[in-house]
Image (cartoon, rainbow, N blue to C red):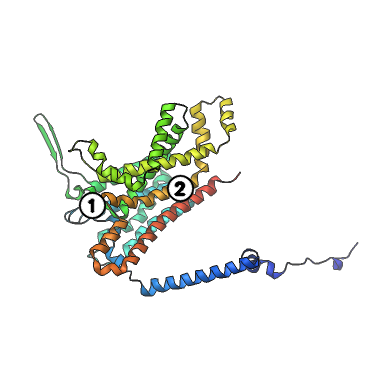
């Protein structure tokens, strides 16, 4: 039997094969061509960062972003033409407070996680906006207080969901619909209400703070978000219905769904928006009220739902037919098999493509300029065209707009990745 002194000591691996050096050798310099590619890529990244930071910090003039300021967010909503007296600024901010409270409720329903981080980031970003270096004439104390109120609004939403019966998915969904409708009502306002029934005449004057603001003056990022939220909320269920209709055994239903999907997928969105503004009204009387915002929302939803239908149909076709056969063997009806077995798995499998469609929808909202609406991109373009002295700052304006779009799309992608990880998408 060998003594303790004769026991061989373990041999440690070479330092070049462990730690940072080992990782770099395996992943960056595993072969001669991998090493060359690593060196060339590193040089390109360093040069891009050097010249990018040099231009950003030394050559670029970002003053134009501050000059446009709040118009990036609400467009011409609070101008004299849209709102005499410029006292409509509180309406978008009140809607933001309701959304922040909704995020607080979602924080509890989702048990923290990514929703918690998104809610805190949104409330913090809104509150920090109160400290922008504007004069009190341009951003008054009332505006700053409403922005700071997003922090207690988040706490109120969290407390409502945590300590009241409203902290369920069903109530949060109902509250989300209410928030969207109240946002539209707040932004639109209302005229005086008149009612006449025989000798009874009733006239209710509305306060000046709730005077109507035509949708023509709605703009900026608020317009993009409204159209995106409406399109996302409606295109998913409509796309599911179209996908199920296309797989239906009823010939009429199947043909109608196929025609709808192929027509909307075969025509560019910009063409559909143009037709909604100039051709669709020809089918209605001349005195029929026109609403560009409603037309744009409907067309964007229909266009996105056609693509969503194909995404859902692909998820349904990826399922093994044995699952439906097992459901039928258990005595489940066809609608029960689809609703409780096939559809949940299909949606889970195509979460990346669904979120990709949502991201595309959000970016496509910038095309509403074709029907005369002024979104955040059009705000920047019209400002540059109307102020020739700032044309040298065109790059800065559109880089800022690109960063805004990237922030929202990356947030959607981040939430999608966390959801995929939670649901185990792509794992057996």
The numbered dot on residue 393 is none
Q: Please, which residue is most extreme toward the right here?
A: 1
The image position of residue 93, as x and y in percent, is: 29, 53
Instruction: Please give the residue where the numbered disc 1 appears in the rendered image.
Output: 217
Q: Quadrant of the N terminus?
A: bottom right
Instruction: Please give the residue where the numbered disc 2 appears in the rendered image.
Output: 355
Point 18% across, 48% down: residue: 211
Relative depth, front residue between 33 and 45: 33
- Up the image or down, 104 lies above or below 72; here it is above
Q: How many marks?
A: 2
- Up the image or down, 30 lies above or below 364; here it is below
| Helix, strand or loop under label 1 | helix
Q: Quadrant of residue 303?
A: top left
Is residue 24 visible in this depiction of the protein?
no
Left or right of 403: which side holds 370? left
The image position of residue 34, as x and y in percent, is: 61, 65
Q: Residues within 10 Å of mark 2 (few under 14, many from 20)?
A: some
Q: Please, which residue is most extreme toward the left here?
A: 199
Left or right of 324: which side holds 169? left
Q: Quadrant of the C terminus?
A: top right
Relative depth, front residue between 11 and 282: 282
Point 29% across, 55% down: residue: 220
Point 49% across, 45% down: residue: 351
Q: Please, which residue is most extreme toward the top here?
A: 331
The image position of residue 225, as x and y in percent, is: 34, 50
Q: Residues within 10 Å of mark 1 (few under 14, many from 20)?
A: some
| Disc 2 to disc 1, C-alpha distance | 30 Å
- Up the image or down, 284 lies above or below 252; here it is below
């Amino acid at each position: 039997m060998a003594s303790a002194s004769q026991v061989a000591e373990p041999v440690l691996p070479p330092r070049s094969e462990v730690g940072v050096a080992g990782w770099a050798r395996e992943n960056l310099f595993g072969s001669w061509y991998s090493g060359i590619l690593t060196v060339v890529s590193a040089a390109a990244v360093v040069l891009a960062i050097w010249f990018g930071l040099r231009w950003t910090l030394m050559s670029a003039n970002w003053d134009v972003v501050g000059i446009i300021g709040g118009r990036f967010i609400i467009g011409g909503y609070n101008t004299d033409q849209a709102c005499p007296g410029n006292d409509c600024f509180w309406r978008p901010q009140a809607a933001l407070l309701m959304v922040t409270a909704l995020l607080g409720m979602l924080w509890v329903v989702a048990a923290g996680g990514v929703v918690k981080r998104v809610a805190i980031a949104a409330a913090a970003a809104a509150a920090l906006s109160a400290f922008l270096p504007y004069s009190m004439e341009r951003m008054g104390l009332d505006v700053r207080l409403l922005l700071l109120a997003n922090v207690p609004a988040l706490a109120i939403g969290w407390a409502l969901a945590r300590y009241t019966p409203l902290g369920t998915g069903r109530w949060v969904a109902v509250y989300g619909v209410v928030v969207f409708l109240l946002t539209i009502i707040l932004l639109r306002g209302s005229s005086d209400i008149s009612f006449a029934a025989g000798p009874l005449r009733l006239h209710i004057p509305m306060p000046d703070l709730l005077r109507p603001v035509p949708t023509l003056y709605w703009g900026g990022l608020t317009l993009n978000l409204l159209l995106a939220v409406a399109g996302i909320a409606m295109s998913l269920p409509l796309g599911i219905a179209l996908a199920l209709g296309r797989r239906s055994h009823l010939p009429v239903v199947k043909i109608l769904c196929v025609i709808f999907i192929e027509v909307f997928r075969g025509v560019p969105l910009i063409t559909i928006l143009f037709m909604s503004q100039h051709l669709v009204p020809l089918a209605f009387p001349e005195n029929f009220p026109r609403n560009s915002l409603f037309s744009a929302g409907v067309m964007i939803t229909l266009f996105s739902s056609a693509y969503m239908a194909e995404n859902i149909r692909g998820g349904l076709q990826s399922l093994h037919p044995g699952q439906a056969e097992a459901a039928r063997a258990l005595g489940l009806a066809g609608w029960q098999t689809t609703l409780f077995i096939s559809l949940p798995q299909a949606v889970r499998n195509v979460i990346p493509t669904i979120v990709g469609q949502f991201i595309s929808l959000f970016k496509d909202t910038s095309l509403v300029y074709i029907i005369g609406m002024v979104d955040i991109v059009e705000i920047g373009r019209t400002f540059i065209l109307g102020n020739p002295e700032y044309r040298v700052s065109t790059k800065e304006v559109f880089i800022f707009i690109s960063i805004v779009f990237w922030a929202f799309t990356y947030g959607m992608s981040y939430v999608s990745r966390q959801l995929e990880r939670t649901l185990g998408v792509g794992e057996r």
